[in-house]
Image (cartoon, rainbow, N blue to C red):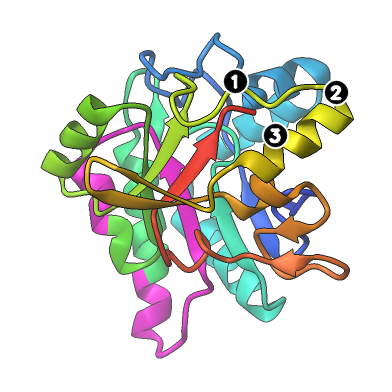
Amino acid sequence: MKVANGNDKLGKGCLVVSRPVGKTCPSDCDFLDNGCYAEQTEKMYPNVRPAGMQNLITEKHRIRAMILDAVSKNKSIRWHERGDWFLDGKLDTDYVENVMWACQSILDDGKTLPDMWFYTHIYDSRLVAMEKYMNVYASIHNAEHKITAMAAGFKKFAWCDSDQKIAPKRPRNKVKANAWRKALPKLVVIDDTKYITCPEIRRGRGVVTCTPTKGSVSCELCVKGLANVLFPSH
């Protein structure tokens, strides 16, 4: 498995698995060809997409070794900072099954898994089954998405405020961006469901990180699946 160490948002306390954007994403993803940060990253850095392409070749023992490496380093795993569980428009069942096999084999050996989490725009019950091993979030943009995800069995949700109904998009001007952050609510209720506004977005890069990092506050809300999360447009 091709992995990277955490970044300024995720923190240094995790390993990151990515796959190529588009090829592994649902074609109806709201972000695809519409401001997707992962897509922009691939365009800005030529080596990024080839690195993600390496994870299209999936092998269960390599996945197992990667997970055990995370355990030995006391790090969590962020699955798919870029990309998703599809391959050319369909669920990559070989990949899903290999990840699940790797996780179960570690548990069968009497060992523990690291904290792991992912967000997905693929509302498929076969991904919900991975909750046995990691925290699974359905990325949703509206009530219709949530209904579809719930019907598939998803229990945790990451509401992406791409329609800017909760807050306007973050301004680029630093002073205005700071004021924008201060105006963001800590908690929102949408259709009787509570969402915590992403602390890293609300408080700023370098102040909060997803995982433990020197000099920042460790959030771990999604890492440990503590609550539903709201991502304001940014």
Q: Amino acid at mark 2?
A: Asn
What amino acid type is highlighted by mark number 1?
Cys
- Give the number of the disc on residue 36: 1
Mark 1 lies on a secondary structure that is loop
C-alpha distance separating marks 1 and 2 = 21 Å
Residue type at mark 3 is Trp
Q: Earlier in the sequence, mark 2 or mark 3?
A: 2
* Front: mark 1 or 2: 2
Q: Position of residue 132 (x, y in %)?
A: 29, 67
Label 3: how many Cα within 10 Å (few below 14, some 14–19, many 20+): some
**Residue that carries the numbered disc 3 in the rendered image:** 180
Quarter residue 130 falls in: bottom left
Q: Position of residue 111 (x, y in %)?
A: 46, 87
Q: Which residues are magenta?
A: 104-129
List x then y, in percent, for residue 91: 30, 32
Give the labeled residue for mark 2.
Answer: 173
